[in-house]
Image (cartoon, rainbow, N blue to C red):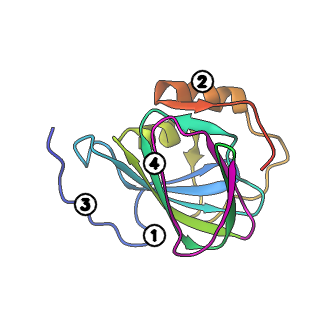
């Protein structure tokens, strides 16, 4: 399937709430002919994902804010303008150390489908109100497995 030209401005694209953050779909796998999924994440301090790997590659570019990334056994403090490429199978996690906004590209595509299934439609295009209940990591992990996302046992960042 061939991809098509996709143009989305800031504030456009499907908006989802998940793990305390706002996840925006900028280009879907279907739109790119399966080549990639492009997402923009806005995540508050302390609300990063559990350690995980992907079957495909992931590239992140920090637009605003700072985060501490754990990549395998290495820890990296990253800020605006930092680009990180993760090869398929790289164990990674991160924790925002200030409010964080990142652009993320997954190749091949398909991760957008994970976020659509695991998240919930955002009622506003803002970070959701703090939840009084912990996330259902088992549910998220089961959905992730269908899309090549493998959640590992939590470790400290």
- Name the residue that disc number 3 marks: 6
Q: Secondary structure at mark 2?
A: helix
Residue at x-position 60% and y-position 39%: 91
Point out the stretch of residues depicted in magenta. 74-98
Nearer to us: label 3 or label 1: 3
Most foreground residue, 60 or 115 = 60
| Horizontal side, residue 1 vs residue 151: left or right | left
Cβ–Cβ below 8 Å for labels 1 and 4? no
Label 3 packing within 10 angstroms: few (<14), some (14-19), many (20+): few
Quarter assignment of residue 124:
bottom right
* Residue 153 highlighted magenta (yes or no): no
Nearer to us: label 3 or label 4: 4
Cβ–Cβ below 8 Å for labels 2 and 3? no
Most foreground residue, 23 or 50 = 50
| Horizontal side, residue 144 vs residue 56: left or right | right
Q: Secondary structure at mark 1?
A: loop
């Amino acid at each position: 399937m061939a991809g098509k030209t996709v143009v989305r401005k800031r504030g456009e694209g499907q908006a989802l709430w998940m793990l305390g953050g706002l996840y925006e779909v900028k280009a879907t796998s279907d739109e790119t002919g399966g080549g990639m999924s492009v997402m923009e994440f806005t995540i508050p301090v302390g609300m990063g994902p559990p350690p995980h790997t992907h079957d495909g590659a992931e590239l992140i570019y920090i637009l605003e804010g700072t985060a501490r990334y754990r990549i395998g056994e290495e820890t990296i403090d990253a800020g605006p303008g930092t680009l990180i490429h993760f090869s398929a199978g790289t164990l990674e996690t991160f924790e925002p150390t200030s409010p964080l906004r990142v652009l993320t590209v997954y190749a091949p595509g398909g991760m957008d489908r994970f976020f659509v299934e695991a998240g919930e439609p955002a009622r506003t295009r803002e970070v959701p109100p703090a939840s009084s209940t912990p996330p259902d990591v088992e549910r998220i992990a089961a959905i992730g497995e269908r899309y090549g996302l493998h959640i590992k046992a939590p470790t400290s960042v």
